[in-house]
Image (cartoon, rainbow, N blue to C red):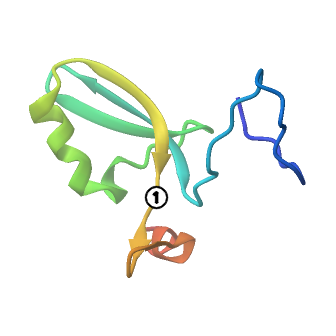
Amino acid sequence: MLATPTSAIPADDRWQHEVKWDGMRVLADVRDGEMRLFTRTERDVTVAFPELRGLVDEYADMLLDGEIVSMRDGVPSFAAMAERF
């Protein structure tokens, strides 16, 4: 499910919201000592994020869906993310 832009946060208690980070949605698939990272279009981006290799040491089998955000000077930077490709 993708985020939908809005001009106002719903006030109704039935709604929840979260910050939209300026990053890349990725599935991290850790299985049998190997890790693969895929975008929502199934592009393999494993080599672009070597610092996530440690997930293999911490988790035997895992499928994680999340947003990878690159930071520059403590602030999210899509430009820093783009430099990886």
Residue 21 is situated, as x and y percent measured from the top left of the image, at 58, 55
- Residue at the spot of label 1: 69
Q: Which residue is at a point 81% across and 45% down the rendered structure image? A: 9
Q: Is residue 59 left or right of residue 36?
A: left
Residue at (24%, 55%) from the top-left corner?
A: 50
From the top left corner, tell me how far across and down residue 25 is, in percent: 55, 44
Q: From the top left corner, tell me how far across and down residue 28 is, in percent.
A: 37, 34
Above or below, comparing residue 61 to residue 51 in the picture: above
Report whether 78 appears left or right of 27. right
12 to 67, vertically: above or below: above
Type of the residue with mark 1: Val
Q: Residue furthest right?
A: 7
Name of the residue lying farthest toward the bottom: 73
Residue 43 drawn above or below residue 68: above
81 horizontally vs 49: left or right: right
| Location of residue 3 (image quadrant) | top right
Residue shown at 19% from the left, 45% from the top? 53
Q: In terms of depth relative to the viewer, which is nearer, 43 or 27?
A: 27
Judged from the image, the secondary structure of the residue bearing numbered disc 1 is loop
Q: Residues within 10 Å of mark 1 (few under 14, many from 20)?
A: some
| Residue drawn at x 50%, y 46% as measured from the top left | 67
Give percent across and percent down for residue 45: 42, 49
Instruction: Please tell me how many numbered marks the rendered image carries.
Output: 1
Identify the image quadrant of the N terminus: top right
Quadrant of the image occupied by residue 72:
bottom left
Q: Relative to the observer, which residue lies in front, 31 or 11?
A: 11
Compared with 74, 54 (above or below) is above
Out of 55 and 44, give the one closest to the viewer. Answer: 55
